Amino acid sequence: MSLEAQEKAVIELGSLGEDIPNLNADAVIENIINKDEALDKYLVMIDSAKTEKIERGMTKKDADEAAEEEKKKAIEDIKKSLKPQVEEDIIKMKQEYKTAKEALDSIPTEVTATVITATLPAALPPAVPNPIYTLGIALQAKKTLSKVLNIVLSSLTNVIILANKLKFELPSAVLNLVEKLSTVTNLLSLIPG
């Protein structure tokens, strides 16, 4: 597969992720630029260089225009260099969020199926209920749910790490999954085994 085809595949796969409100490359890049202290210092240096240009014989108007042009170019160059990485990180965030959300949403179904299975007798009457069978079902369900919760934990951790990297404030819908994960994890710890 060529690199061009791979890039196209990444974009196509990225569109399958779960949308996160207000998460788009241009807004994220603007936010990164606005919060970049090194860039702020560089822009101040450009302004400071105006005085030197005036002393060398440039008019104030020309020095101001040159400084503004240099600042604009610096910002555009940074935007251009950030865009591919930001787009890639956004795709990762969307995929991880989708994984976490779908896994967490599957837990009630898993629990319901486990309760139903555990309450059914191991055999049809005249058999006697088998508590060891029921305990085995509960332990198997706990193990399965623990695996699901680990997937959610890993995915949410990656979403938060990427959001921090992109200086993106996650919406409450995403952060609510963290609370939901904590609640479910605490409930699961009550099951013996």
Image: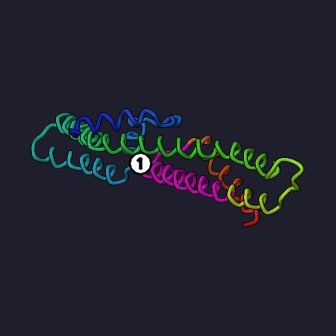
Residue 157 is one of the magenta-drawn residues: yes
Q: Is the magenta stretch mostly helix, strand or loop?
A: helix
Q: Position of residue 79 (x, y in %)?
A: 30, 40
Q: Can residue 82 be seen in this view?
A: yes
User: Does dot 1 land on a helix, a strand or a loop?
Assistant: loop
Location of the C terminus by quadrant is bottom right
* Residue reaching furthest to the bottom: 193
Residue 97 is one of the magenta-drawn residues: no
Q: Is residue 64 visible?
A: no
Q: Name the residue under label 1.
A: 35
The amino acid type of the residue labelled 1 equals: Lys
Q: Where is residue 16 in the image (x, y as percent from the top left)?
A: 45, 34
Identify the residue at image location x=47%, y=48%: 163
Identify the residue at image location x=47%, y=40%: 94
Residue density around tag 1, few if under 14, some if 14–19, many if 20 or more, within 10 Å: few
* Residue reaching furthest to the front: 126
Q: Where is residue 149 in the image (x, y as percent from the top left)?
A: 61, 54
Q: Give the range drawn in magenta.
A: 142-170
